[in-house]
Amino acid sequence: MFKADSSVGSPFVVTSSNGGHSPEQVAELCVNRLIQVADSAPPELAQQARAYRKQMLAVVTHYVKVGIAEDRKTVAEKLNNAGYGQLAQQIKGL
């Protein structure tokens, strides 16, 4: 699923079953990559960083969901324009 890129750290593998990852899982992967709290951080700083991480997880989750919804609208519109109206309606309903 992920291409290793030396500019973003070490590669890792995340698997799922019965489909792809949920928006929440993708957001968690993103936030884990962006925000890390060192075990050696002072307790007050670590607490603030964890609170910030929690807020960013909510923001990233929201926008992942928005991106999915917008992509489905784009795909449905293209299907509709190509004469696949019934399929477009099914895509919109996902």
Image (tube, rainbow, N blue to C red):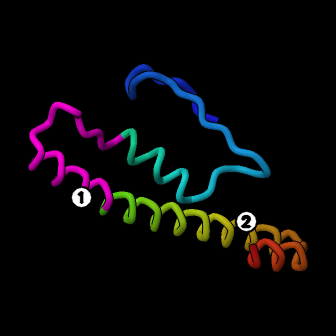
Q: Which mark is residue 75?
A: 2
Question: Going 63% across and 64% down the picture, which residue do you hit?
Answer: 71
Q: Amino acid at mark 1?
A: Ala
Query: Does residue 53 show up magenta in the picture?
Result: yes
- For disc 1, the neighbor class at 10 Å (few under 14, some 14 to 19, many from 20) is few
The quadrant of the image that shows the N terminus is top right
Q: Amino acid at mark 2?
A: Val
The percent coordinates of residue 43 (x first, y second) are 12, 45
The quadrant of the image that shows the C terminus is bottom right
Question: Vertical placement of 21 versus 63: above or below?
Answer: above
Give me the C-alpha separation between circle 2 and circle 1.
Answer: 37 Å
- Label 1 sits on a secondary structure element that is helix
Question: Do labels 2 and 1 touch, CB within 8 Å?
Answer: no
Query: Does residue 48 show up magenta in the picture?
Result: yes
Question: Going 20% across and 50% down the picture, which residue do you hit?
Answer: 49
Q: What is the span of residues highlighted in magenta in the rendered image? A: 34-54
Question: Going 39% across and 39% down the picture, which residue do you hit?
Answer: 33
Query: Which quarter of the figure has residue 55?
Result: bottom left
The percent coordinates of residue 54 (x first, y second) are 32, 59
Query: Which quarter of the figure has residue 67?
Result: bottom right
Query: Which quarter of the figure has residue 58?
Result: bottom left
Q: Which residue is mark 1?
A: 51
Q: Is residue 57 left or right of residue 83?
A: left
Q: Nearer the viewer, residue 93 or 73?
A: 93
The percent coordinates of residue 52 (x first, y second) are 24, 57
